[in-house]
């Protein structure tokens, strides 16, 4: 009996010790699991931060390159009067802003292997900007076409290599964290109830899945932004190069005496003028978008004769040989004549480039508004593109909605109409495409009575009523 009484406390102490030991083991395993998850998450987060930096540097580098090229092009065109000093100053400001953002990324580069390439490219950009500020356009152009371009290619290659290495590290860290988690969970399943293990496994895996999903979403977002910038810059370079090539080529013909008779010389001069006008329109759209996205567009409202604005918008197309039919009434509205002319030029250019052979402009009034209808007898806009008709920059992935353009004209026109207090809509009616600009009419300001109510705008209002 005494032996039994002595052994009983010993057994209890042994059981307590085993329980405490098991508890400590469980605590250690739980702490270890938590620590492993934390370390894995911290490594993945650090890798994601590095990857974000490389993506941001790629996008900002491309933007800086495009901004400096734009400033150099504007500097070349400033002497010919195609670009005003204000536009040149704005382009220089955008180039300096892009350069400053790239310099900020350089300061945040840390131990990145692309630091040297970024420093080299930034030095070339500074050299080109310094030449532009000194008025040495040729020197800036030389830097851009040689040293700066090579430095940019080296920077892109270095960043892309670094991206691949970081992605590999993310994959390795994620895999290592997963293996550690599964190893510890194996021991936990031997020591705790199966239900608790299953719950924990579910929570742990869900956390890892959410973390990976978040990282993947961030990476994809950065990639989409980078692709959109690269595609737009490529499209911009192509569309500006096309009219420039024609201008330079025909100018050389005139300079070398290739146009032997007066009629040929006039024809060649007209082609140069048309291409210059088209390039000016694209530059105007680019500047308008830049101002809409940054400082905003200044609007100066004043009483304006609609017919005068329509005539000024039609004139350059008539000089280019395009027969535009004009009809309707004159009226007075409160608007910014220059911005309204910009809208109409974009609509007429769109109809001439993408519509049918016949283009016209009709003006009408009714229900307190004046409508300006720009129409053509082309095939119209496909149904699957109507929702994106007034978007800017990129439509349907890498392709612009209207081929042969930057995809800016209709988007700029729509946003300018919002600023003018009006609206822009598209209608397909009687085998014709209509872009209808509507503005509030000043009471009693119709100069010429309406001859009939057969315009599309009148019919649309009648059907709506």
Image (cartoon, rainbow, N blue to C red):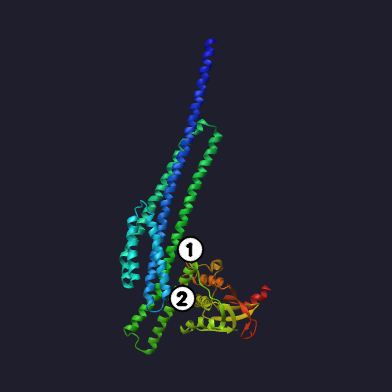
Q: Nearer the viewer, residue 322 or 196?
A: 196
Q: Residue at x 51, y 72 (%)?
A: 298
Residue 369 location, x and y as percent? 62, 77
Marked residue nearer the N-terminal end (2 or 1): 2
* Of the two numbered discs 2 and 1 in the rendering, the one whose residue sits closer to the viewer: 2
Is 76 in front, or is 217? 76
**Residue 329's spot in the image, x, y percent?**
60, 84
Mark 2 lies on residue: 281
Label 1 secondary element: loop
Which image quarter: residue 451? bottom right
Question: Picture coordinates of residue 365 (x, y %)?
Answer: 63, 80
**Residue 181 in view of the camera:** no
- Looking at the image, is 26 positioned above or below residue 157? above
Residue drawn 50% across the image and 29% down it: 23
Q: Quadrant of the N terminus?
A: top right
Q: Residues within 10 Å of mark 1 (few under 14, many from 20)?
A: few
Q: Quadrant of residue 41?
A: top left
Residue nearest the viewer, comparing 335 with 356: 335
Identify which residue, 273 or 353, lies in the foreground. 273
SS class, disc 2 = helix
Marking on residue 397: 1
Residue 44 can be seen, yes or no? yes
Residue extending furthest top? 1
Residue drawn at x 37%, y 52% is: 110
């Amino acid at each position: 009996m005494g032996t039994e009484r002595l052994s009983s406390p010993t057994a209890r102490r042994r059981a307590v010790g085993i329980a405490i030991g098991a508890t400590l083991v469980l605590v250690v395993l739980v702490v270890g699991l938590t620590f492993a998850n934390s370390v894995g998450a911290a490594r993945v987060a650090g890798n994601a931060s590095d990857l974000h930096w490389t993506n941001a540097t790629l996008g900002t580098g491309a933007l800086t390159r495009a901004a400096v090229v734009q400033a150099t092009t504007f500097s070349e065109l400033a002497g010919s009067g195609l670009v005003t000093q204000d536009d040149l100053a704005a382009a220089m400001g955008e180039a300096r802003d892009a350069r400053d953002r790239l310099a900020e990324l350089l300061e945040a580069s840390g131990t990145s292997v692309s630091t040297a390439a970024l420093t080299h490219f930034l030095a070339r950009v500074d050299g080109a900007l310094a030449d532009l500020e000194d008025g040495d356009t040729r020197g800036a152009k030389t830097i851009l076409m040689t040293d700066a371009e090579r430095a940019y290619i080296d920077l892109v290659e270095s960043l892309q290599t670094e991206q691949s290495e970081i992605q590999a590290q993310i994959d390795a860290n994620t895999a290592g964290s997963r293996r550690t988690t599964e190893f510890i969970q194996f021991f936990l399943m031997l020591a705790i109830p199966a239900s608790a293990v299953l719950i924990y496994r579910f929570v742990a895996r869900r956390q890892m899945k959410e973390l990976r999903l978040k990282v993947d979403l961030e990476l994809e977002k950065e990639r989409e932004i980078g692709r959109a910038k690269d595609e737009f810059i490529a499209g911009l370079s192509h569309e500006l190069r096309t009219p420039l090539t024609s201008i330079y080529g025909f100018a050389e013909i005139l300079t070398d005496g290739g146009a032997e008779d007066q009629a040929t010389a006039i024809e060649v001069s007209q082609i140069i003028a048309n291409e210059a006008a088209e390039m000016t329109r694209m530059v105007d759209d680019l500047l308008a978008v830049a101002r809409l996205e940054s400082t905003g567009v200044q609007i100066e409202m004043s009483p304006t004769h609609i017919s005068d604005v329509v005539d000024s918008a039609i004139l350059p197309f008539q000089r280019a040989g395009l027969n535009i039919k004009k009809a309707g009434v004159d009226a007075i509205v409160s608007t910014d004549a220059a911005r309204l002319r910009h809208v109409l030029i974009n609509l007429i250019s769109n109809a001439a480039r993408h519509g049918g052979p016949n283009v016209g402009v009709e003006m009408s009034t009714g229900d307190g508004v004046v409508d300006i209808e720009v129409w053509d007898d082309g095939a119209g806009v496909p149904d699957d593109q109507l929702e994106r008709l007034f978007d800017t920059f990129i439509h349907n992935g890498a392709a612009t909605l209207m081929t042969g353009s930057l995809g800016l004209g209709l988007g700029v026109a729509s946003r300018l109409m919002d600023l003018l207090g009006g609206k822009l809509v598209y209608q397909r009616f009687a085998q014709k495409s209509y872009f209808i600009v509507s503005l509030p009419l000043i009471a009693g300001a119709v100069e010429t009575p309406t001859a009939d109510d057969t315009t599309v705008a009148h019919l649309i209002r009648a059907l709506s009523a």
